[in-house]
Amino acid sequence: MSPSFVPGFALGFSLILAIGAQNAFVLRQGLRREHVFALCLTCAVSDAVLIAAGVAGFGALAGAVPWFEPVMRYGGAAFLLWYGARSLRSAWTGGAAMQAGNGQGTSLRAALVTVLAFTWLNPHVYLDTVVLIGSISAQYDDRLSFALGAMFSSFVFFFSLGYGAGLIAPLFARPRAWQVLDTLIGLTMWAIALKLVAM
């Protein structure tokens, strides 16, 4: 294994470790045991594509297009505000979303569209995954191994998050726990959206 693989893995893992919109959605779906494999695979493959683009030099191209960053920033903020409002409404009203484990609450198509929006409409993913990883990879002779390490970290993280959520699923047999989680998710979405607008 190349020495560049471990730094790539460490950087990639550290960048996706913080709770964000995408991670919160995967956690919620993991708790509900809905489409976990498809969502984890979609997130990890999306990250791999973005990492490959960054290492291949797309970060410099994105920086050269002046309208790219504000369009992604405001589009992402609007989506996060809408999803945050939906989560807070779910926390307030309760209902069918409070039931975990039967896999019938959200269609696969709706879940994939949502997680793809969280991934590709988030300007931070371009700053972190494309620009930052792309620029740091230039410091290594073996950029391919660095990129593979970062990609592998995404697969490890998302599958651990999605399937690891099942370990705390018994706690979410109670409707109150779902209400707390939905409230936290909604507030997290709004906080990220406000931070994007204030940039």
Image (cartoon, rainbow, N blue to C red):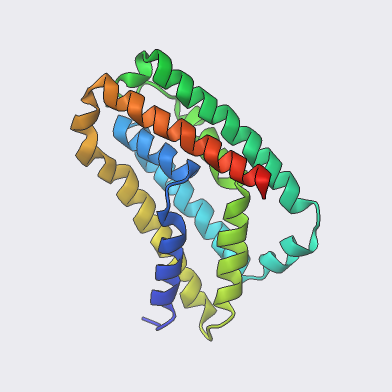
Residue 29 x, y percent position in the rendering: 37, 34
> In x, y percent, where is residue 73?
68, 46
Q: Note whether 62 is above or below 108 in the view shown.
A: below
The quarter of the picture where the N terminus appears is bottom left
Of residues 192 and 4, which is closer to you in this image? 192
Viewer-closest of 34 and 196: 196
Picture layout, residue 60 above or below residue 22: below
The residue that appears at 43% across and 24% down in the rendered structure is 106
Residue 65 lies left or right of residue 170; in this view the side is right
Image coordinates for residue 148, horizontal then vertical, percent: 46, 69
Say which of 133 and 41 sits in front.
133
Residue 158 is left or right of residue 89, and the answer is: left
> Which image quadrant is residue 9 in?
bottom left
Above or below for 39 versus 178: below
Quadrant hosting residue 77: top right
- Residue 116 in sight in this render: no
User: Which residue: 81% across, 56% down?
Assistant: 66
Identify the residue shown where x is 40% and y is 28%. 182
Q: How many marks?
A: 0
Outermost front residue: 198
Can residue 67 be seen here? The reply is: yes
Q: Residue furthest bottom?
A: 141
Please report the residue visible at 70 percent of the width from the left and 41 percent of the height from the top.
74
Vertical position of residue 142 compared to residue 35: above or below: below
Q: Position of residue 196 (x, y in %)?
A: 63, 45
